[in-house]
């Protein structure tokens, strides 16, 4: 069976200014990243005939959760597109990139501009951080599963994911000291990333002494709201050979959802939909977890990154705590370098796309002080939590 996503490659990346409360128009951030990605690939705007984003424009949610949709970007850049895609019902944020791979593989587009814009730091800078889908708590009427969680004060993904983490603690004996290594490792890497929001040292004492947000999560288990846009170009492989960069090949993708699509009624509360996405990814390649040189795994909350490590087979189910204990295995010089840009816990919440961007940076050898040694050839980028999950296996081989 032909693995169709192998017809797709990544040919360029771009990122806007990233910061806390930049007070810039989100469409301006989007333009900055998109134009940078097009230039990085050695393309012109006229070459782009596809657009893909998550979640797109006109999607209700917390203020700043979305900054631009396909139609806004098409109009802004005066693009003529043959295919475009946006909307929240996708396998995580990187589902929009997976969809772009499918589009170029089937001939619907040749070069697809994928982008994700957030400006939560500015939009919510005047008050408490809003829960997803709550409209900041202003005149909000709950529907769906939230009508059952809100009466118990569970308005945020911090509460919902904490429930998964607490079950993992109960089942497998995972500890806060073990989970802390996800955050401590992220901060060490962020110190070498000039765009990272938080770069000062973080100690175990700092981590354990911070206020509890939702047990077992403390402040440093939660990602950092930021303003910024990230963009990537997905191209058809046969037309990418003469572009500016050596293309990064999409070896396999994972987007499966085989459990109940629920934040609070998942069949196994020690894992999430990423379990199914990871299983699909490995079913579509002969490569193994041991072949991966760099892992850029979603850490909207620290436990999600630990759950991705288990789901992708870097350690056994339930063994994530002992695997990360001490931090050596996930360090830049460890068995599987994790979140080399600082992840969302320290570099800032770019909502999934930042991990794909960093995977490409590492494979192209452009990480500077945070570059993983040994000329990495294979990377995995993954995003999503709860009932959402999508991942891509990338290679220079």
Image: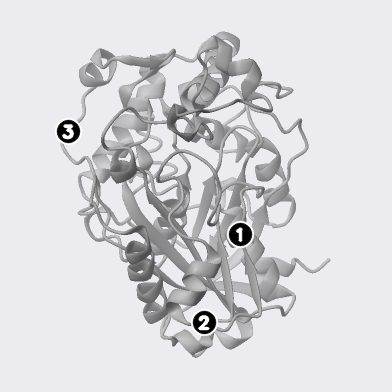
Q: Residue at x 54, y 84 (%)?
A: 240
Mark linked to residue 206: none
Q: Residue at x 63, y 40 (%)?
A: 388
- Label 1 crowding class (10 Å Cα cut-off): few <14, some 14-19, many 20+? many
Residue 26: x, y in percent?
35, 58
Q: Vertical placement of 302 versus 237: above or below? A: above
**Which residue lies under the disc numbered 2?**
79
**Which residue lies under the disc numbered 1?**
86
Q: Earlier in the sequence, mark 3 or mark 1?
A: 1
**Which residue lies under the disc numbered 3?**
201
Q: Nearer the viewer, mark 3 or mark 1?
A: 1
Question: How far apart are labels 2 and 3 at the CA level?
Answer: 44 Å
Q: Earlier in the sequence, mark 2 or mark 1?
A: 2
Whether label 2 touches label 1, CB < 8 Å? no
Query: Quadrant where the N terminus lies?
Result: bottom right
Q: Nearer the viewer, mark 2 or mark 3?
A: 2
Question: How far apart are labels 2 and 1 at the CA level?
Answer: 16 Å
Q: Earlier in the sequence, mark 2 or mark 3?
A: 2
Question: How far apart are labels 3 and 1 at the CA level?
Answer: 38 Å
Q: Residue at x 21, y 29 (%)?
A: 202
């Amino acid at each position: 069976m032909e693995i169709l996503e192998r017809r797709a490659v990544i040919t360029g990346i771009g990122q806007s200014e990233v910061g806390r409360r930049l007070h810039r128009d989100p469409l301006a951030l989007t333009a900055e990243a998109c134009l940078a990605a097009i230039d990085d690939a050695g393309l012109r705007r006229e070459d782009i005939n596809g657009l893909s984003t998550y979640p797109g424009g006109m999607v209700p949610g917390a203020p700043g959760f979305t900054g631009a949709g396909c139609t806004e970007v098409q109009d802004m850049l005066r693009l003529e597109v043959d295919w475009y895609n946006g909307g929240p019902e996708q396998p995580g944020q990187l589902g929009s990139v997976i969809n772009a791979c499918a589009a170029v593989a089937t001939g619907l587009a040749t070069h697809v501009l994928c982008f994700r814009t957030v400006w939560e730091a500015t939009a919510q800078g005047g008050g408490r951080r809003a829960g997803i889908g709550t409209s900041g708590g202003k005149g909000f009427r709950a529907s769906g599963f939230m009508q059952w969680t809100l009466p118990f004060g569970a308005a945020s993904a911090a509460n919902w994911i904490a429930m998964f983490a607490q079950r993992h603690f109960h089942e497998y004996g995972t500890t806060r000291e073990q989970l802390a290594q996800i955050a401590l490792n992220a901060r060490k890497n962020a110190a070498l990333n000039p765009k990272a929001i938080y770069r000062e040292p973080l100690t175990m004492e700092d981590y354990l002494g911070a206020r509890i947000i939702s047990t077992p999560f403390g402040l440093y288990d939660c990602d950092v709201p930021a303003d910024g846009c990230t963009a990537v170009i997905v191209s058809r492989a046969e037309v990418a050979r003469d572009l500016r960069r050596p293309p990064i090949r999409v070896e396999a993708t994972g987007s499966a959802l085989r459990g109940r699509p629920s934040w609070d009624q998942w069949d196994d509360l020690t894992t999430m939909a990423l379990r199914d996405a990871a299983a699909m990814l490995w079913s579509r390649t002969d490569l193994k977890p041991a072949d991966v040189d760099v892992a850029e795994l979603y850490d909207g909350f620290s436990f999600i990154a630990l759950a991705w490590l288990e789901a992708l087979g870097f350690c056994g189910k339930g063994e994530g705590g002992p695997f990360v204990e001490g931090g050596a295995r996930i360090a830049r010089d460890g068995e599987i370098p994790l979140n080399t840009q600082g992840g969302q816990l320290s570099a800032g919440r770019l909502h999934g796309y930042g991990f794909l961007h960093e995977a490409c940076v590492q494979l192209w050898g452009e990480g500077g002080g945070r570059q993983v040694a040994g000329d990495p050839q294979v990377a995995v980028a993954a995003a999503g939590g709860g009932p959402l999950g999508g991942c891509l296996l990338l290679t220079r081989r």
